[in-house]
Amino acid sequence: MPYEMIATLMFSTMMLMLLTGQRVFGAIGFVAVVAALLLWGDRGGFDIGFAAAMKLMKWYPLLTLPMFIFMGYVLSESKIADDLYKMFHVWMGGLRGGLAIGTIGLMVLISAMNGLSVAGMAIGATIALPELLKRGYDKRMVTGVIQAGSSLGILVPPSVVLVLYAMIARQPVGQLWLAGVVPGLMMAAMFIAYIAIRCRINPELGPALALEDRDIPRAEKLRLLRAGLLPLVIFAVMMVPFVNGWTSLVESSAIGALAAFMAAVLKGRMTREVFENSVRNTLAITCMFMWIILAALAFGAVFDGLGAVKAIEALFTERLGLNPWVILILMQLSFIVMGTFLDDTAMLVIVAPLYVPLVGALGFDLIWYGILYTITCQIAYMTPPFGYNLFLMRAMAPPEISLRDIYASITPFVIVMAFALALVMIFPQVALWLPNYVYGN
């Protein structure tokens, strides 16, 4: 059987298993191991799985994964994240759209604490959404704000998705995280600019808080400011030594986890329940990602053995004669299509064995492409009819917000994100300047 046919059969089998509701790592790992056994027999098949496991166990930066997830859950479970919103509520409520702008700020900081979009969505839907609706904000405006803001979790460091990409693409996690900083902050600034302009034109979408709601003693405002900035201080304590080269990435992640734990203890919020929930959730998510990475490595090893990547490169560049930029854009469009029924990790694991080597062969920077992939996933999360964030929002939103409202709410934010993606594609230094500066020094 031709290798191209084998590769097509592997992909179609994997997609069929995913559509039947199988776990992502189970479907990918099963297809990889069965294909290896059929192609190379018992010895070759077992060697591929064993080699993938050893590669995973020896990948030292993987230790950052449980550290950052634990840090995020400690700050979330101990309600330290709630203080952030109280701070934004008091300090920005007097502006038109101020609470929505504060919600974007909340999402950026939550992203810096956790690295998962689900965490931002959960906190935004439970803390910010009821408050915004109660204050007379337009339901479509605030629904879009929370969905767009939560999507920053997979771009702003410490992004768990970029850790997964780093393992599959064999790129430094630290450079990928630094590459996500400027695009993430740029996108957040674009969201804020859109909210401010829109509420300036139509104040009914985001009215300012009444004077009596803002009449708070200055001492109380300063107390809320100190409490709300605590997560930012923890992030600085963690990242400044790393950026300056004083600590390694793993050491910085340990500092962040310890700082979050000590902050919860000093504030008297580290109860037995908070600790157990944080550890349990950290263990569950870390194990899930390790299984996914293991399956992806095995799947990629089979593709390397088949030579499928070179065959696809020859198809696009020689037979079809496509320009490298056309091929890159087609890849991004395929992510958006897959994002209608898959989450980001599944998308990456399915196409990484093909796309990542092909991108490198076309002469593009793999760090830069990791950011393009992540932004495209953010767009795919919010693209109807089956965007991942759309259904998360529907599950968490109150009854008065319909699925039609959720679909309508994301249109302007998707346009903003597409514009940000175009900027990063046209000007690669938007993503590459910071890692080049830090690692160049």
Image: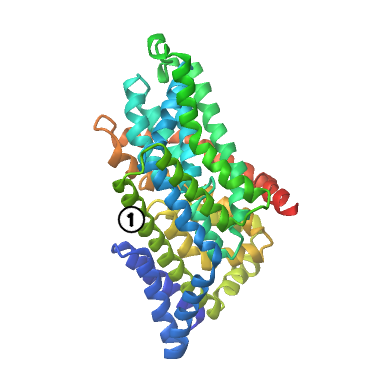
Q: Is residue 265 left or right of residue 320?
A: left
Q: Position of residue 9 (x, y in %)?
A: 41, 75
Q: Residues within 10 Å of mark 1 (few under 14, many from 20)?
A: few
Q: Is residue 43 left or right of residue 391?
A: right
Residue at the outermost right position:
441
Identify whether 361 is placed above or below 428: below
In the depicted view, which residue is nearer to us: 301 or 182?
Answer: 182
Tag count: 1
What's under tag 1, amino acid-wise? Answer: Arg
In the depicted view, which residue is nearer to us: 78 or 190?
Answer: 78
In the depicted view, which residue is nearer to us: 25 or 220?
Answer: 220
Res. 39 image quadrant: bottom left
Q: Residue at x 49, y 70 (%)?
A: 56
Q: Residue at x 62, y 71 (%)?
A: 314
Res. 185 image quadrant: top right
Q: Is residue 272 left or right of residue 389?
A: left
Residue at the outermost top position:
211
Name the residue carrying label 1. 280
